[in-house]
Image (cartoon, rainbow, N blue to C red):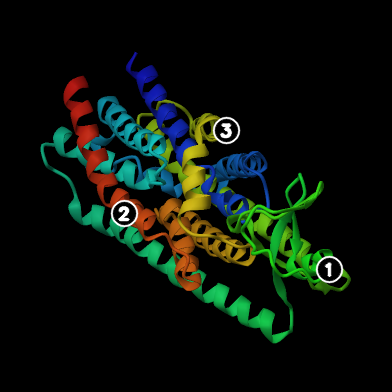
Amino acid sequence: MLTIALLLSTLFLAYNNGANDNFKGVATLYGSGVLSYKSAITIGTIATFMGSISAIFVAQSLVSSFSGKGLVPDDIAGTVHFLISVGIGAGVTVLVATRLGIPISTTHSLVGGLLGAGIIAAAGDVNFYNLFGTFLIPLLVSPFIAFALSMSIYYLLSRCRKAIGLTKESCICVGEKKEFVPVRSLAVAEMGRTDTPVGKHTRFGPQFTIADSSDCVDLYTDRVWGISLQKILDAGHVLSAAAVSFARGLNDTPKIAGLLVAAATLEIRISMILIAAAMAVGGLLSAYRVATTMSKKISTINHGQGLSANLVTSFLVIIASKFGVPVSTTHVSVGAIFGIGLLSRKLDGKVVRSILWSWLITLPVAALTSAMVYVLIA
C-alpha cells in the first residue's frame, strides 16, 4: 500500500512539474508570435519527453543527488514515509504556483521537501553543509549566469547584424487573418496617406485593418543566399526552443525519479518512462496559465531575443545535466528572459518582483508542507 502511495505521489509531482515547466522551453516561440500556443506546447511536450528518455543514458548522476542520501542519514533517506512526504510537499507547492500562473522551480520544491521532511524524520540531523554546497550554490548562481550570458549574446548578435547590413522593420497586422506586413509595404498600400496613427483600429477596405500596437512585431526583411532571413531565424528559434525543452526533460526527470529509486520501488528506466509520461500529460492539460506569464507578461520578446535566450538556457542546462549539477531550468530560463528584457528596457517590474518573491518562498513552503505530511503519515 505504501509503495503504491509513493508511486502516486511521485507521479503527482511529475504531472505538476509538466504543468509548470513544459512550456518554459517554448515560451519565447509563443511570446514572439512564431507559433501558436497549441503548436508551441506540442513541440515542447515532444522535446521534453525525448529529453526525459535520454536522461536514462546521460543524467543518472542526478538521481542519487535527489534521493536524500548525503542530506539525511541513509536509514532515513530510503524510507517510504520520508519519500512520500517529499513528493507530496514538492507536488503541492508546484500545483499551487501553477494555478496562480507563477513559474517556479521544481528543483527548489524538491530541495525544500527533502529539507522539511528530513528535519522531522531525522530529528534535525541534516547535513546543512551538503545542502548548501550541492544544492543551493548552483541554484543561486545559475540565473545570474543566464542573465549575463543572454544579454551578452543578444548584444553581440545585434552588433553583428548591423555590421553586415541586415535590417529589420516594424510590422503591423493586416486582414481578417493575422498576417504581419512590413511598415514600408503599408506606405505603398496607403498611397502616401499619413493621417492614420498606428495602433488605432482603422479599416481601409473590406480586407485591410491595422491592429493594436501590442500586435506589432519586428521582422527581418533581408535575404541570405536567396533565403528569407526571417525564415532562417524562425527555424533557428524553433530548434533552440526544442533544445531547451529537451534539456529540461534531461535535467528534471532524474531528480523526480530519485524518489522511486531511493526506495527501490521501480527499476530506474521504468521510473523515468512513467515520469516522462506524467510530465507530458501535465504540460498538455495544465500549462496555459504559466505559459501566459512566461510568454506575455515578463517582457515583450522579438525573434532574435527569443533565440538568444533559448541558446543560453539550453547550453547551461545540458552542461549541468551532463555533470550532475542540480540547476533549475526555471531559474535559468527566466534569468535569460530577464537579461533580454533589461537590455531592451521592456521588463514588467511588477511581474518580475512577484516571480522573485515566489522563488524566495518556494523552498520554505515546500519544506513546511513536506514536514506536515511526514508528521501526519509517520
Query: Residue 227: x and y, percent?
Result: 85, 67
Instruction: State the residue position of label 1.
Output: 191
Do the numbered discs 2 and 1 sit on residues whose CB atoms are within 8 Å?
no
Give the residue furthest to the bottom.
163
Numbered badge on residue 4: none
Q: Quadrant of residue 78?
A: top left
Badge 1: few (under 14), some or many (20 or more) residues near its Cα, within 10 Å?
few
Of residues 204 and 280, which is closer to you in this image?
Answer: 204
Instruction: State the residue position of label 2.
Output: 135
Of residues 237 and 351, which is closer to you in this image?
Answer: 351
Query: Residue 242: x and y, percent?
Result: 63, 51
Do the numbered discs 3 and 1 sit on residues whose CB atoms are within 8 Å?
no
Look at label 1 and name its amino acid. Met
Residue 88 in view in this figure: yes
Residue lying at 62% horizontally and 53% vertically, measured from the top left: 29
Q: Nearer the viewer, mark 3 or mark 1?
A: 1
Residue lying at 54% horizontally and 44% vertically, measured from the top left: 23
Do the numbered discs 3 and 2 sit on residues whose CB atoms are within 8 Å?
no
Give the residue furthest to the right.
226
Q: CA distance from mark 3 to mark 2?
A: 29 Å
Numbered badge on residue 284: 3
Q: Nearer the viewer, mark 3 or mark 2?
A: 3
Which quarter of the rendered picture does the C terminus lie within?
Answer: top left
Query: Residue 258: x and y, percent?
Result: 40, 38
Left or right? Give the position of 195 relative to 5: right
Q: Quadrant of residue 99?
A: top left
Query: Residue 65: x and y, percent?
Result: 36, 47
Residue lying at 41% horizontally and 25% vertically, measured from the top left: 265
Look at label 3 and name its amino acid. Leu
